Structures are given as structure tokens and as C-alpha cells.
Image (cartoon, rainbow, N blue to C red):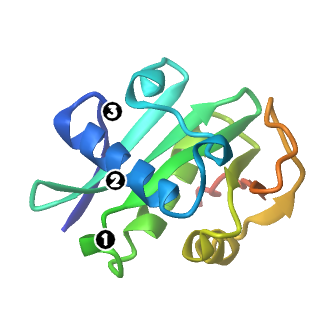
Amino acid sequence: MIEIAQESPLTDDGRALLAGSDAALRAVYSADECFTLDPEELVDDKITFLVAREGGAALGCVALVNCGDYGEVKRLFVTPEARGKQLAQHLMDTLESRAIALGHTSVKLETGDKLVPAVALYKRLGYSVCGPFGDYPEHPASLFMTKPLVPAVVA
């Protein structure tokens, strides 16, 4: 059974997941094309770091940055051996629920078109291409996406 919970990015598992994310990004992008946050930068009251586990093993992570009226997705990663289990979708669903609970009206992210599976996931989840946001510069390696959030209606 998959469990997703908020954890510290400074644990051994958190650091290992983020190192895996860095390695995956560096396989397709140069250092100046990556806009990531390191584990220490993810320790902030405005950031929720989520880890997906199965049988105690850390298999994926994602961070939600509270940017006021919107949330920003950072560091979505699933280990190679855990791919195909819909972990990324479960992590994003949990992140979006947290964003709604924080009162965000949308979620935004910066990714790259070379990350084909990630872009396909985001499109499948209802994200659409938008322009740069926050303090991101216009960059040829960047693809910016957004999704409006609709709070669940309680019957």
C-alpha cells in the first residue's frame, strides 16, 4: 500500500530522492537549465515536502511551495524501480489537495519539454502551458504550466 506523508527533505531518504531527481535532470539538462531547490532550501515554513512510501521504502517525492494565491510544484520525482505504479499521479493528487486546503486558487510549475513523461503527466492532470511566473526568467529550456484548483464540494 502506498502512503504519502509530509517529511523532512533532510532525512537520508529525502536526500536520496532529491539526489535521484538531480541525476535525472542532469542527464538531459545542463546545470544552468535546472531551477531546483536543494534539501536545505526545502526546509521552510512555506514548503511542504511529501514522500511516497511502500512497505517503508521511499519511492518518490514532491514539494509544494506556498506562493500566496497559488502553489508551486517543485522536485516531483519517482525512483526508476517504482515507475509504472502511478506514484507521480498520487503525489500530485496529494499536493493539489494540500494546495486547496491552503486556499490556493491554482498550482503552477516549471519543467522542461525534454521531460516528456512529466509533461504528459501534467497535461493528463489538467495542466496547461502558461508564461513565466514568480521570479523565473524566460528560458528556452523552461516550460511553464498551470492548473486552476477547484475545492471539493461537500454534499
The answer to whether 79 is drawn above or below residue 4 in the figure is: below
Q: Give the residue displayed 60% in from the left and 69% down from the top.
A: 115
- Quarter of image, res 10: top left
- Residue 9 is labelled as 3
Q: Earlier in the sequence, mark 1 or mark 3?
A: 3
- Quarter of image, res 2: bottom left
Tell me the element at label 1: helix
- Within 10 Å of the Cα at label 3, are there few (<14), some (14-19), or many (20+) other Cα atoms? many
The answer to whether 123 is drawn above or below residue 99 in the figure is: below
Q: Give the residue displayed 24% in from the left and 73% down from the top.
A: 81
Residue named by callout 1 = 80
Q: Give the residue displayed 67% in from the left and 35% down from the top.
A: 103
Q: Give the residue displayed 32% in from the left and 78% down from the top.
A: 85
Residue flagged by tag 1: what amino acid is it? Answer: Pro
- Residue 65 is labelled as none
- In the image, taking residue 40 as reference, residue 8 lies left or right, namely left
- Within 10 Å of the Cα at label 2, are there few (<14), some (14-19), or many (20+) other Cα atoms? some
Residue flagged by tag 3: what amino acid is it? Answer: Pro
Residue named by callout 2 = 20
Tell me the element at label 3: loop
In front here: 68 or 51?
A: 51
Q: CA distance from mark 2 to mark 3?
A: 13 Å
Position in image of residue 60 (x %, y %): 33, 57
